[in-house]
Image (cartoon, rainbow, N blue to C red):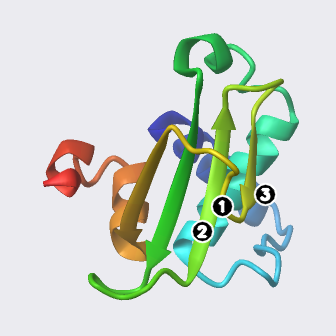
Amino acid sequence: MEVVMTNLEAKQQAKASKGAAVAAPATFDTKSEQIFGMMATYLKQGLGKPLIPKVDSVFCFEITMKKGQKPFAIFEIDLKNGEGKTQRGAPAKADATFTMTDADFEAVCLGKLNPQIAFM
């Protein structure tokens, strides 16, 4: 995940340095929404296909603004079927559900927070 984020950030910075405006779609108001948008793009390009047999799972992420609050957004990452997909909304059946703050989700994806530490 960290490699994907680093590669996408590098591409955005390269475009920005060439004078092209780089802006997230208007629906992406939080870091987690931006990250899930990048994941969706990655999977739509078929780049996640090698992960499907290795991961073989559907994940649900419930994102909150602060610990203890109700989720403001729920996302599905399907790394079990087809070429994989990411979409907003709860999956019909998740193999695992993670509830975390927007800030913690971003930190885990950027490699700044160890997922095991976040779990504890």
Q: Quadrant of residue 65?
A: bottom left
Q: Position of residue 44 (x, y in %)?
A: 86, 39
Q: Are marks 2 and 3 in contact (CB under 8 Å)?
A: no
Residue highlighted by disc 1: 90
Q: Is residue 4 visible?
A: yes
Front in this rendered view, residue 61 or 105: 61
Residue at the location (51% across, 37% down)?
95
- The 10 Å Cα crowd at callout 1, few under 14, some 14 to 19, many 20 or more, is some
Q: How far is disc 2 from disc 1 in space, using C-alphas?
A: 6 Å
Q: How far is disc 2 from disc 3 in space, using C-alphas?
A: 30 Å
**Number of the label disc, if any, that sits on residue 22:** none
Q: In the rendered structure, which amino acid carries the disc numbered 1?
A: Ala
Residue highlighted by disc 3: 15
Q: In the rendered view, would you say 91 is above or below 51?
A: below
Q: Secondary structure at mark 2?
A: strand
Q: In the rendered structure, which amino acid carries the disc numbered 2?
A: Ile
